[in-house]
Image: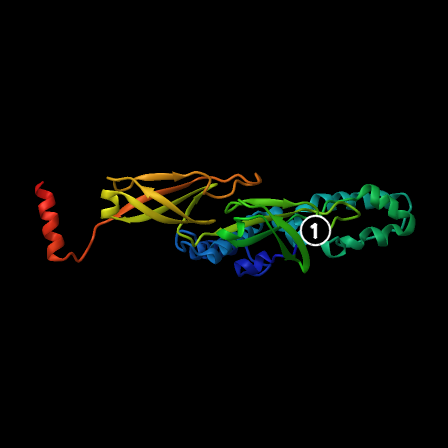
Amino acid sequence: MEFIDYYKILGINKNASEGDIKKAYRKLARKYHPDLNPNDKEAERKFKEINEANEVLSNPENRKKYDQYGKDWKHAEEFEKARQSQQQYNRSGRQQYYGDFSESDFSDFFESMFGGTGRSYRRSQARFRGEDYNAELRLDLMDVYKTHKRTLTVNDKNIRITIPAGVENGQTIKIKGHGGPGIGGGPNGDLYITFIIENKSAFKRDKSDLYLNKDIDLYTAVLGGEITVTTLDGKVKLKVKPETQNATKVKLKGKGFPVYKKEGQFGDLYITYTIKIPKNLSEKQKELFRELSKI
């Protein structure tokens, strides 16, 4: 995973005091708060970054680890254990090493320390799991109506994944072994993909069920008739019963959204009728309504 500069995110330098960090965080949090930026995905992303940066830098212990180990600060305890192993190994008469131990030289640490025979010691004593990666994938509602494959580029590496039909907005899936490389022969981390599903259609989605408002004219509502409804997999004809009331709901079974990871299963489509009152009536039409009202 690429290095995230928390100081840069908050707009401060590495010598900033705790007060500077708190002041910068409050200023940016107010600016990008979701309540002040409704439906702004970029502001939402920045707000999350700001909170993450503050959680690390406002904690003295975490800040110390971050300053020393950078993007691998969460593995600081493992690095310290490796340092202790180095010191124990040095007491046995091996070559001595001094100086700061940072994330930039961690990958070369055991090679320079143990040489040829030391590699077996490194493999058995210092295998660390790679860092997990997190990514967002933005898709349209119709992109997840059918199962399909897609190629993602993560840290300049192409990864071919299968996106199951029915994935929900905000859902996260794990791609095992596609995170950061392991340290000292340890396993790779995993890749977590969060789906952001944009729905620009007339349908409202609730898991595998869909909801749609459909206008019908007054005459069809009163006398009954046939209307055409557009679903996600085509158009269907629907009979309207005579004397249908406003806000009447009907269900089209199996015409909803695919059920996640259940091939061939679909939710239902619920249609709510909205009766439209006619406008710009002619005098003759108005007279007919008057006569009808007297009956």
Tell me: 187 left or right of 294: right
- In this figure, which residue is indicated by the disc labeled 1? 180
Relative image position of residue 271 (x, y in whole percent): 36, 43
Q: Position of residue 20 (x, y in %)?
A: 51, 56
Give left or right: position of 229 versus 135: left
Residue drawn at the location 57% of the way across and 45% of the way down: 172
Closest to the observer, 131 or 265: 265
What residue is drawn where x is 57% and y is 40%?
A: 263
- Residue 95 percent across, percent down from the top left: 89, 51
List x then y, in percent, for residue 11. 53, 61
The N terminus lies in which quarter of the figure? Answer: bottom right
Q: Residues within 10 Å of mark 1 (few under 14, many from 20)?
A: some
Question: In screen coordinates, is 293 left or right of 35?
Answer: left
Q: As drawn, is 166 to the left or to the right of 124? A: left
Numbered circles on residues, count: 1
Instruction: Kindly tell me whether residue 87 is visible in this rendering.
Output: no
Q: Is residue 77 visible?
A: yes
Q: In the figure, 241 relative to 22: above or below?
A: above
Judging depth in this view, the residue of 111 and 201 nearest the camera is 201
Q: Nearest the camera: 178 or 3?
A: 178
Three-letter amino acid code of the residue under disc 1? Gly
